Image (tube, helix red, strand yellow):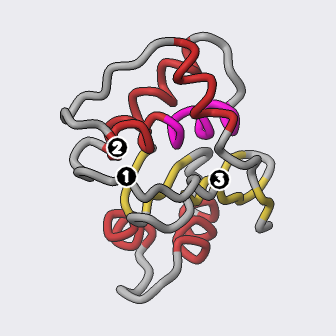
């Protein structure tokens, strides 16, 4: 499930000031197996059967428009999963695609395999929270 922090708080039944970590814990307790929570320029929070983690997107001074960033995360993560990529690595690829999207002069970024691979290499590994 892909959601922003506001959606995560509502789905988790936590208060409006709850952190992504608190929302993720509540959703796990409620039985949701996997999810990714976006929070603007803050790190992505994810959870799966192995726990809760974050992925910090590489900083960019070239942001043009944030339109489509969440869609880039969702679409790229799903495509990677469909190609057999493990969930956490698929999420890293989604973060890379989001960065490329916000830096693009168009809403839908266009890039080749080499540029995408370079973007993924800039995304740090997951950091375990729980």
Among the 4 quarters of the image, the one containing residue 1:
top left
The residue that mark 3 highlights is 47
Q: Residue at x 80, y 60 (%)?
A: 128
Quadrant of image for the C terminus = bottom right
Circle nearer the N terminus (1, 3): 3
Distance of label 2 from label 1 (alpha carbons): 5 Å
Residue 121, compared with residue 37, is above or below; it is above
Q: Residue at x 53, y 71 (%)?
A: 20
Circle nearer the N terminus (3, 2): 3
Residue range corresponding to the magenta coloring: 87-96
Q: Identify the secondary structure beneath mark 2.
A: helix
Neighbor class of circle 3 (other Cα within 10 Å; few <14, some 14-19, many 20+) is many
Distance of label 3 from label 2 (alpha carbons): 27 Å
Residue 36, compared with residue 5, is above or below; it is above
x and y, in percent, of residue 115 in the image: 53, 22
Per the rendering, the mark at residue 62 is 1
In the image, 74 versus 30, the foreground residue is 74
Magenta-drawn stretch contains 90? yes
Residue, far front? 61
In the image, 3 versus 58, the foreground residue is 58
Distance of label 1 from label 3 (alpha carbons): 29 Å
Circle nearer the N terminus (2, 1): 1
Among the 4 quarters of the image, the one containing residue 4:
bottom left
Q: Is residue 78 left or right of residue 67?
A: right
Per the rendering, the mark at residue 103 is 2
Q: Identify the secondary structure beneath mark 3.
A: strand
């Amino acid at each position: 499930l892909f959601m922003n922090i506001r959606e995560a708080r509502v789905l988790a039944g936590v208060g409006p000031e709850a952190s992504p970590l608190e929302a993720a814990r509540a959703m796990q307790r409620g039985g949701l197996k996997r999810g990714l929570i976006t929070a603007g320029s803050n790190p992505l929070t994810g959870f799966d059967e192995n726990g809760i983690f974050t992925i910090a997107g590489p900083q960019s001074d070239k942001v043009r428009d944030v339109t489509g960033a969440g869609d880039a995360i969702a679409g790229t993560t799903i495509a990677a999963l469909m190609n057999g990529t493990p969930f956490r690595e698929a999420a890293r690829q989604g973060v890379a695609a989001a960065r490329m999207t916000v830096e693009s002069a168009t809403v839908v970024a266009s890039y080749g395999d080499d540029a995408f691979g370079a973007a993924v290499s800039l995304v740090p590994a997951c950091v375990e929270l729980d």
